[in-house]
Amino acid sequence: MRKFTRSALFGVTGLLATSTGVAAAFAAADDGDVTEKATNSTPPPIVEDYSYPGADAIEAETGIKLIEGDGNIIKTGCDTDTPVIKVESVDVATSCYEVIGESGWLTMEIPRVYAIHGDDHSVDASLTVNGETENVQISPGEYTPVGEGQQPPDNDPAALVELRVSQ
Amino acid sequence: MLRSRRAAGIAATAVAATALCGLPAQAISGGQPVPDGSYGFLAKVDVGDQRSCSGALVAQQWLVTAASCFAEDPANPGSVPAGEPTTPTTATVGGGDVSGSSGHTVDVVDLVPRTDRNLVLAKLGSAVDGVTPVSLSETAASQGDTFRSAGYGRTATEWTPNTPHTGTFSVEAVGDTSLNVLGTSEQDSICKGDAGGPVLRQVNERVELVGVNSASWQHGCFGEDTTKRGATIARTDDLVGWVNSGMLDLTATPASKHAINLSWKPSNAEKYRIYAATTPEVPLTDSALVGTTSNHTYRHEALRASRTWHYRVAPVTASGQQQTATHTVTATTTPEAGTDFNGDGYEDIATFEKGNFSVSDSDGVSFSAEKSWNTSLIEETDTQLSGDFNGDGRSDVALFKQGESGGVYVALGGESGFGAFRLWHGYFAPQGERPAVGDFNGDGKDDIVTFLGNDATNNGDVYVSLSTGDAFIEDDDKWHDYFGLDDERPAVGDFNGDGKDDIITFLGNDTNNPNDVYVSLSTGSAFVEDNDKWHDYFGLENERPAVGDFNGDGKDDIITFMNDGEGGAYVALSAGDTFNTGSRWHDYFAPDGELPAVGDFNGDGKDDIITFRTDEEGRVYVSRSTGDTFVEDDDLWGTGVCPQSELSWKQCNALPASSL
């Protein structure tokens, strides 16, 4: 049974405050008719399936493929005072992930990751190197080189496939 | 350095993208968390690890939620199977923070789905006390009405919140089974995880349920960038009767060979109509109406063995109005233990001679020509009995080698014949004991019993050996200390109709208690030793008593054949804890010298009587039961069965076993 434990949400609130300001600028630049009523066709189901919210848009925008999770690790902006997990890649932009509460997991595909910077949790990162999965422990606050960020001969390209924080 | 500079630039874009998604957002919810405890009926529904939804408690042990939560494809919620959810599911009821310990988390044990809309009624494993269920509105929605929707779904900023949120929505259109609604502000939206959450009308100080969240464009929900707004709601205002009948929680269980018990929860109905059919569709018509009762139970009687029945029950109000009927429940009567060797629902007959045995199949109106099986195993000192020892719905034959080894051999009955005799028990009912057959633990597989009678050291002991389906357990299991002595005539039957066979003894010419009849009921692991007299004058010394369910009520009755020149047959019906006085059911059947027996030869669920005349033609007569008498029509069902001149050992060894 999935058990969500979560103690604080203040970090997310901070993100919203930042985001809304930026978004307002986009809205103003549009035609004005931002939304439409849609009553003629059938809307999609609203069962929570734990697939990452808006994953397609994020992939199109950033090349980062977020797959699914328990909702307790979410992608966030890196420009924040909240402790975040920072993932650095040769191919795609650096991305940041916030852990809400004590535990969580998120599966993804981020190619050619060379370093992961820990937040204030102990994080298990799963990476695929030459078709095999390796687990790397990311200590709180530590910068941990992985994949091409390591010294030869251990510097084969690595793809990040999962972040997991256990209580 | 190069790497980090580039990375920083793109990171800024990522923030912008996140912001765009977050833009107009306040999901279900309009940013209004539910004050703790104010919507105590609100539930979070977790379908395994794969899905979550919301729901509303409508009775102490029942939720309504969305069918899509349980559908293989949530976009097609119309095909959710009724019954236990295929994925283990829990509901946390209480409307509070589900990460805390404030809610009641219970299993969802049963689903009653609608097929015309995205809604199921879900039964909880236990009642949720201390929570007031939401009441169902019977007032249809109108365009322009404003309702409040609640759920544990995503908000603008949270993926899996632990606390519920609400938002307000106005009705845009009213359909037969659904509503189209639109948030009263752009911030009000229904998001993933809100499926099944309650949609509520405020009526003065309280709220009433008008529907559950069904589908939504999810405008403004966390991570969504659609510009489409609006949602659909599955209506509940027209389902009040359906919900009430669903909560009747109708169940059907086989009671015995010939009866099925129905039971349901009490409601405020005046009475209930019971509809039954052998087809999965149960029409609510007079032809399918089998009974009406003001109780919460009903016993459907006089059914054929191994027959599947489907039921619906419709409550009727004091004013005579029939309410919505329940969904369909199904049960199958247990197999007939008697002599239905091929499992077609009609009991057959068999005869045993030196070196072979023969079966004549009943087709409901007569017996076919004999088919024979050779086996050198059959000897004069054997006792042959029948029963469904492996529980496959077909009766089998057991040979008790009483004269020799004391072994018990079984040949299993099949659709078109018998398997070979195989040893099922190494030593049971040796010479001097009286074996019999019955399903004493009610598991659908017939067991064996032996009455030791006036055995010198084990006076009156009764031993049972249970069937495992391919052997009898050899554990010397004594079920009664003192039953069926000396000249008494013990037998087996389900006299209280609980599906477990009991034992009976006819005392005959006993000096102290002449002509008494005692029954000892089975508990499933023993026979109750309480000296329970069920009749004080039945089965006299020279008569031939036997056991059968003559009125088909699932409780075995007793019959006695006068066994004199006059040939009368008397039946005393079981009331479940005693036999009635009895009355004459046939004026002239099986006079002195014939072999009378009992079986349901026409498969109508009521035991009939048969007599093997053992005359030169080997004639066999059957007199069918009508439920309160035997038809006196001299109905010849077969010939060539135990003709006098061909009898091995000068006697007819026939099944069904002849009366005592």
Image (spheres, coloured by chain):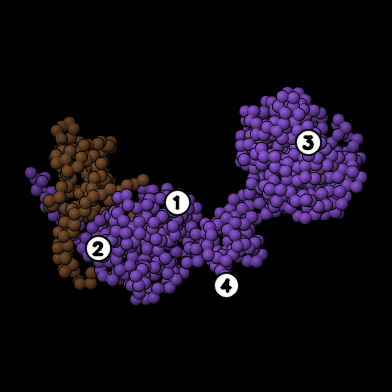
Chain colours: A brown, B purple
**How many neighbours does mark 2 have within 10 angstroms: few (below 14), some (14-19), or many (20 or more)?**
some
Kindly identify which residue carries mark 4: B319
User: Percent x, y for residue B290?
Assistant: 65, 61
Say which label, 3 or 1, has the lower sequence index. Answer: 1
Q: Earlier in the sequence, mark 2 or mark 3?
A: 2
Q: Amino acid at mark 2?
A: Gly
Which subunit holds the residue at mark 1? Answer: B
N-term mark: 2 or 1: 2
* Residue that badge 1 annotates: B126
Q: In this rendering, do the residues under marks 4 and 2 share a single chain?
A: yes
Q: Give the CA separation, mark 4 to mark 2.
A: 47 Å
Q: Name the N-terminal-most of marks 4 and 2.
A: 2
Q: Are there few (<14), some (14-19), or many (20+) residues within 10 Å of tag 1?
A: some
Indicate the amino acid at tag 1: Ser
Foreground residue, A55 or A5?
Answer: A5
Residue B398 visible in the shown view = no
| Residue at the spot 63% in from the left edge and 30% down from the top edge | B477
Q: Residues within 10 Å of mark 3 (few under 14, many from 20)?
A: many
Label placed on residue B31: 2
Question: Which quadrant, please, contains the C terminus of chain A?
Answer: top left
